[in-house]
Amino acid sequence: MTFTFHRIPVGICNCFLLRGERTILIDAGAWNGMPAFVSRMKELNVDPKQIDLILLTHGHWDHITNLSAIREMTGAKVAIHGRDQFMVETGEPPFPAGATPYGRMMSWSSKKLIHPHLPKVKADMVIDDSGLSLSEYGIPGKVVYTPGHTMGHVSIILDSGEAFVGDMAMNAWFLRITSGLPVLADDINMVVQSWKKILPMGIKRIYPAHGMDFPVEIMQKEIGNFK
């Protein structure tokens, strides 16, 4: 079996295409991201209708803005953890709390300015706390429940050591200068506990939703120094 994965920047959010026997798209991106999604799919020579599942790390607006359009384009099923299910089904996801002084300022201002009213999308697959194996898609990995950024956040960990962690880590200039823990989280202590849960799972490289990938040693140090 041949397996590949690709980063697909969709607005300010990285989506990821996992291609095994079947194809999974992780997250659905932010505002103004559809042209980039369509362009990248053409560049990869992938027919959008080959996507079988849209797997959401969580339900914040910048991860679900294009969900309705991409599902209509692909016919794919939508999977999200039960605790974030309401975000896609109401189309009005809340904005997270701040976990640092900068994050608290961003959260306060964003709650004043950003009031998403997105198309309501019914979840086809509701993930529970036990997670999900991706073996039926011919993808060597699993979905792991990693709450903290939201109460329904999940991460995707491949057997080869790549971890697609949504907003469990951030590495974009507009969020933090260096890679590390998120500046926004409903419960940063729970984020740290989720990291302690997944770090022993053979992770080698971190793929955040915001910014470029980086080695796991950065998060090991970050979690070790967290107080």
Image (cartoon, helix red, strand yellow):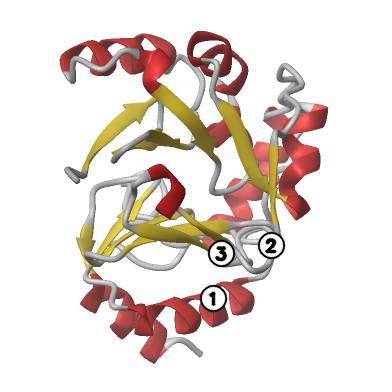
Task: Report which quarter residue 86 is drawn in.
Answer: top right
Task: Report which quarter residue 137 is drawn in.
Answer: top left
For marks 2 and 3, the one nearer the N-term is: 3
Mark 2 and mark 3: span between their CA atoms? 14 Å
For marks 1 and 2, the one nearer the N-term is: 2
Q: Which residue is drawn at 50% across and 9% down?
A: 73
Q: How crowded is mark 2: few (under 14 residues within 10 Å), some or many (20 or more)?
A: some
* Disc number lying in front (1 or 2): 1
Compared to residue 106, the image places residue 61 above or below, namely: above
Compared to residue 99, the image places residue 57 above or below, namely: above
**Amino acid, disc 3:** Pro
Q: Which residue is drawn at 42% across and 18% down?
A: 33
Q: Which residue is drawn at 24% across and 48% down?
A: 212
Location of mark 2 (residue): 186
**Amino acid, disc 1:** Ser
**Amino acid, disc 2:** Asp
Task: Report which quarter residue 99 is drawn in.
Answer: bottom right
Location of mark 1 (residue): 194
Asked if the residue under mark 2 is in contact with the one under mark 1, i.e. CB atoms within 8 Å, the reply is no
- Residue 168 spot, x, y in % from top left: 48, 62
Under circle 1, the secondary element is: helix
Q: Residues within 10 Å of mark 1 (few under 14, many from 20)?
A: many
Compared to residue 85, the image places residue 10 above or below, namely: above
The reply, left or right, for residue 117 in relation to residue 1 is right
Mark 1 and mark 3: span between their CA atoms? 22 Å
Location of mark 3 (residue): 101
